[in-house]
Image (tube, rainbow, N blue to C red):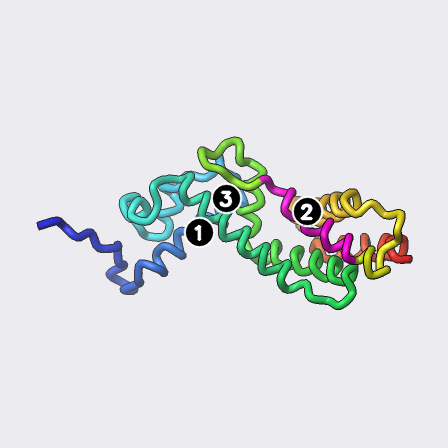
Amino acid sequence: MARVISPPMSQDTGETEFSTRERIVRAAAVAFAERGYAGVNLTEVVEELGFTKGAFYFYFDGKDALVSEIVDRSLTAEDELFKGATDANALDAVITLTRAAAVRYREDALMRAGMRLRMERDLVDAELAEPFSRWIERLTVMLRRAKRTGELRREVNERRAARTIVAVLYGAEALSSSLDSEPPTAQLDDFWEWSAGSLRP
């Protein structure tokens, strides 16, 4: 008779397979967000949770499989942000979106990890999405809609504007994280105060 392998279960908490997997993903996301792909020893991460290395391999084939899941989840979270940008005015929707993204990146280690791992994708033996192209493409579409509805000046190049907005968004996040100073939303608010008027007709 074939041996049935049961998911590891904590004797202290009786936690389920789902919560065990979720704890591994969340703890690893924090580590990846702080130290990057090369700086994370998953054995240490798992042991800090009170699990064995064997417990980790019950859920994931290896480090790169875990990275793929974290990145996939971060992309899903990004999709949710875009779905939430429902302002009637398309340019206002872009402003709302960038501010919501800055808050989410500050609060959610999984999103920060997903972006950092995509930036370090050359180190990972897995197919990971390029870090900024999705944002640029989607913002370009939103800005084109703003131009069609008369909310954006006709001479503005939508794609170049989208690239600049993405650079400011992630630059504000990186600056805020490295200096531990003002939240990135403060820097984005400054950017939009200075630039929104020049984008509108």
Label at residue 32: 3
Name the spot of residue 140 as percent of width and height, x first.
Answer: 73, 49
- Which residue type carries mark 2? Glu
Please name the residue that numbered disc 2 is placed on.
Answer: 137
- Which residue type carries mark 1? Ala
Task: Report whether 75 appears left or right of 192.
Answer: left
Label at residue 27: 1
User: Which quadrant of the structure image shows residue 57?
Assistant: top left
Number of marks in the rendered image: 3
The CA distance from mark 2 to mark 1 is 31 Å
Few, some or many residues within 10 Å of mark 2 (<14, 14–19, 20+)? some
Q: Which residue is found at the position 86% from the left and 60% from the top?
A: 150
| Residue 179 seen | no
Label at residue 7: none
User: Would you say the magenta stretch is mainly helix, strand or loop?
Assistant: helix
Check residue 99 for magenta coloring.
Answer: no
Q: Which residue is found at the position 36% from the left and 60% from the top?
A: 19
Whether pointer 3 and pointer 1 mark residues with C-beta atoms closer than 8 Å, the reply is no
**Range of the magenta residues?**
130-145
| Residue 191 seen | yes
Q: Which residue in the rendered view is the most extreme toward the front? A: 148
Q: Secondary structure at mark 2?
A: helix
* Sequence-first disc among 3 and 2: 3
* Sequence-first disc among 3 and 1: 1
Name the spot of residue 56 as percent of width and height, x first.
Answer: 32, 47
Few, some or many residues within 10 Å of mark 1 (<14, 14–19, 20+)? some
Closer-to-camera residue (9/72): 72
Q: Which residue in the rendered view is the most extreme toward the bottom? A: 88
